[in-house]
Amino acid sequence: MSGAGSPDLEVDGSGLRVAVVAAQWHQVVMDGLVAGALRGLAECGVEEPLLLRVPGSFELPVAAARLARSGFDAVVALGVVIRGGTPHFEYVCAAATDGLSRVAVDTGVPVGFGLLTCDDDQQALDRAGLEGSREDKGFEAAVAAVATAVGLRNAIAGTGG
C-alpha cells in the first residue's frame, strides 16, 4: 500500500510564510488536496498561508518559482493529472515534476510535492484526503514542505534539525 513507512512529522512552523499553489482541473480532488494542505499547515502553526489557484498542473512550476522568489519560506504545489488515451499525461507529468524539482533546487525554497499522477479517477480520489480516501496527499505535501523549511532554518542557524 502506498504511504506505508511514511514519517510521522510533528513540526512547529510558526512564523513561516507558506504559499499553496493549486491547479483547478478535477475540482473534487483538488478541493480535497487544498483542504488537506491547509489543515496540515494549520497543524504546523502556519498562519495565513497564501492560496493561489492556477489553471492546471502544467502551470504549477512557474507559479511556484515566482512565489519562492517572493520571500516565501516554503511552497506547496498541488495538482492532479489523470491518464488518458494520448501522450498528454506523460508530457504534463514530466514537465510539472521536473519544473517543481527545479524550482526547489534553483531557489533553495522547499516545494511540497502534492502532484497526483494517476491512472484513473478512483486513484486520485483515494489520495485526495476526502471522506473515504485512503491517503491525504495535500496534508502530507504541506507538512513535508514545512518540515524541510524548519530543518533548513535550524541548520543554517546552527540549532540542529
Image (cartoon, rainbow, N blue to C red):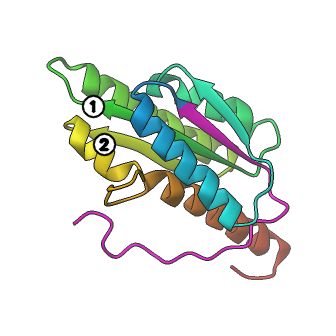
Instruction: Single out the residue that lies furthest toward the bottom.
Output: 160
Foreground of the two, 145 or 23: 23
Q: Residues within 10 Å of mark 2 (few under 14, many from 20)?
A: many
- Amino acid type, mark 2: Ala
88 lies left or right of 154: left
Foreground of the two, 120 or 94: 120
Q: Which residue is mark 1?
A: 82
* Residue 101 in view: no
Residue 17: say if magenta. yes
Are the residues at dot 1 and dot 2 in contact (C-beta closer than 8 Å)?
Answer: yes
Q: Quadrant of the N terminus?
A: bottom left
Q: Which mark is residue 1?
A: none
At a point 32% along the width and 56% down the height, the residue shown is 132
**Dot 2: what SS?**
helix
Q: Which residue is mark 2?
A: 124
**Dot 1: what SS?**
strand
At a point 80% along the width and 55% down the height, the residue shown is 47
Foreground of the two, 55 or 75: 55
- Amino acid type, mark 1: Ile
Percent from the top left, x then y, of residue 145?
61, 57
Answer with the quarter of the image where residue 118 lies. top left
Q: How many marks?
A: 2
150 lies left or right of 2: right
| Residue range (magenta) | 1-22
Answer with the quarter of the image where residue 96 lies. top left
Q: Is residue 155 above or below residue 122?
A: below
- The residues bearing labels 1 and 2 have C-alpha atoms spaced at a distance of 8 Å
Q: Quadrant of the C terminus?
A: bottom right
At a point 53% along the width and 53% down the height, the residue shown is 36
Percent from the top left, x then y, of residue 147?
63, 67
In terms of secondary structure, what is the magenta stretch mainly? loop
Percent from the top left, x then y, of residue 55?
52, 19
